[in-house]
Image (cartoon, rainbow, N blue to C red):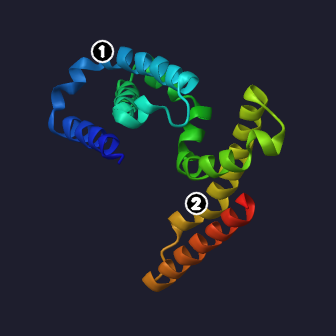
Amino acid sequence: MRAAELAVGVLLAIAIRRWPAWRRYVRSFDMIGWGCLVGAIVLFAVADYQPPWLLRGGFALVAVVWAGLLLGALSHSSFAAVFGWRPFVAVGRMSYSVYLVHWPVFLVLNADRMGLHRWALLGTRLVAVAVVALVLHHFVERPVRKWSPRPRVAVASWLAGSAGVCVLAVLLLD
């Protein structure tokens, strides 16, 4: 279902790896990065959770926008300099944790439960995502990256963690 996003990322990785002349176009990539940033902001501002156009090929467009952002980051120009700022780098370091928790947090902290709407709801959700992701990153992700258990221990830990998350989700969404 989301094959287009994977395909765009794979094609970008192959192009960068096999076409060393891409470095000559760094200035263009800088402009592409800024343009795609504007495009991403517009997409975030106007897209609903399941608009028909997004489900009918729109995710491919989103993947192209993300690829443009990556090209901008590789440009080593103004785009890369701005997003090389320490707070952005810190968010990038925790991006996997943010990715894992953002959707469940958004489901749990909805308008009906919170009594908030629009910007107040978004702000509350973003703060909650940041807190939960920070805890997950420091107490789970970082230790797991440094940990080298035996395969059975790793599998048992993964299964126990997955079961715990499922139970927690059922309890919170019920």
Return the residue nearer the eye: 168 or 57: 57
Quarter of the image holding residue 69?
A: top left
x and y percentages locating residue 106 in the rendered image: 67, 44
Q: What's the residue at 81%, 34% (across, down)?
A: 116
Q: Is residue 114 left or right of residue 104?
A: right
Amino acid marked by disc 2 = Arg
x and y percentages locating residue 130 in the rendered image: 69, 44
Q: Marks 2 and 1: in contact by CB < 8 Å?
A: no
Q: Alpha-carbon distance for marks 1 and 2?
A: 36 Å
Q: What's the residue at 76%, 34% (across, down)?
A: 121
Q: What's the residue at 68%, 65% (across, down)?
A: 170
User: Disc 1 designates what residue?
Assistant: 28
Amino acid marked by disc 1 = Ser
Q: Earlier in the sequence, mark 1 or mark 2?
A: 1
Q: With respect to residue 164, does 42 lie above or below?
A: above
- Given the current orientation, which residue lies at the most extreme front position? 52
Return the residue nearer the eye: 31 or 48: 48
What numbered label is drawn on residue 142?
2
Q: Secondary structure at mark 1?
A: helix
Q: With respect to residue 42, does 126 lie above or below?
A: below
Q: Secondary structure at mark 2?
A: helix
**Which class describes the residues within 10 Å of circle 2: few (<14), some (14-19), or many (20+)?**
few
